[in-house]
Image: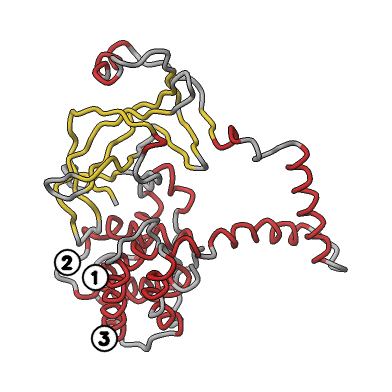
Amino acid sequence: MHDLLEGVCNYDLTGILRLFIIDFKYFSLETLNQRIQYFGYGPTDIRNRPQAISENNLKNKKPLMLKTTASEMWCLTRYLGLLIGDMVPRNSEIWELYIVLNKMLSIATSNSVGPECPFILKNLIDEHHQLYTKLLKTNLKPKHHHLLHYPSIMERVGPLINIWSMRFEAKHKESKVAAQAITSRKNICYTLFLKNQLKVAHRVANSINFDPSALFKVGKTVFISEEELKNISSVLNDVSGYTFISWVNVNGTHYSTNNMCVFISINRETSLPVYGLIKHIYILPDMIPVAICSLFCTNSFDDHYQSYVVNNTKEIVKIKITELPYKKPTSYHIHPDGLLYYIT
């Protein structure tokens, strides 16, 4: 988190965007801010939408131009290809630095890794550092050096996201907010400690978050038209007693029918992922949530946009949400020409 999202990503994107806007004039700062503001991040990432970049920050010489949180930087790095990729030439050497950075970030934040991932990450880090010094004409920072240890750590402990500090920072935020609201500074540590203990005691006394059912929440019941029921009847023939709902939250992950896609499987012929757009969600009498998805046909992976190119299909499938191979949902984005869909 501190090395990548609050360090290397900020250094790289600062240099890349300054070159694109000031030197190469591929687009203006106003255009970039408009795209950041109006881009369709989807229901999951909209709360992490990056902040607009000020003209003063763009023109000063500081190495960190982007004033963002770690979550906002993660969001910006993931979606930058779709945000400005159509305005950047495909043969841009500067853009290659972003592509390598995004690949590094994808592996470092992956929930599961294979035995080859540490080796791939090592090669990406070496390539990144060479491109960074060559293209941005600056020296490496200490946080760049920290990345050199990531492959060996991944070999020992597995996915790096399991040992990152983001969750601890989220817990610290509670005390930070409380500290700002408290006027007394006589013994601030004791005050925050007492406040935390009272909160824990309240949760234990009322069994809050200790009941397994608290990890499963559902939205309101929704009505499905007769015409729509006919369209999805092929996946409902063997089901009875179901209830359609607007959303479901399973183990802290939110699923809804608002432009949300999920990873279904891997196509054995093309080795490309198969995604599905959640059209409906229903629960069975035993409270098992099921998603009815419209499948996308994945054509290829566009390295320039760092996204999968997909097309709509008429195929409908159902899958139990608890059996999804990858739990985190994503969303699809329409290319400016309106013909292709991208999933990142």
Residue that label 3 marks: 134
Q: Earlier in the sequence, mark 3 or mark 1?
A: 1
Measuring from the top left, give residue 5's x and y in whole percent: 45, 67
Q: Nearer the viewer, residue 215 or 80?
A: 215
Contact check, label 3 and label 2, Cβ < 8 Å = no
Measuring from the top left, give residue 49's x and y in whole percent: 45, 54
Q: Amino acid at mark 2?
A: Pro
Contact check, label 2 and label 1, Cβ < 8 Å = yes
Question: Can residue 321 be seen at all in this image of the molecule?
Answer: yes
Observer-side mark, 3 or 2, equals 3
What element does badge 3 sit on? helix
Question: Can residue 21 be seen at all in this image of the molecule?
Answer: no
Q: Amino acid at mark 1?
A: Trp
Q: Nearer the viewer, residue 140 or 155?
A: 155
Q: Earlier in the sequence, mark 2 or mark 1?
A: 2
Q: CA distance from mark 2 to mark 1?
A: 8 Å
Q: Is residue 91 left or right of residue 105?
A: left
Measuring from the top left, give residue 332's x and y in whole percent: 29, 44
Query: Residue 32's quadrant in the figure?
Result: bottom left
Residue that label 1 marks: 95
Q: Residue at x 18, y 44 (%)?
A: 267
The numbered mark at residue 89 is: 2
Q: Amino acid at mark 3?
A: Lys
What element does badge 2 sit on? loop
Q: Nearer the viewer, residue 102 or 145?
A: 145
What element does badge 1 sit on? helix
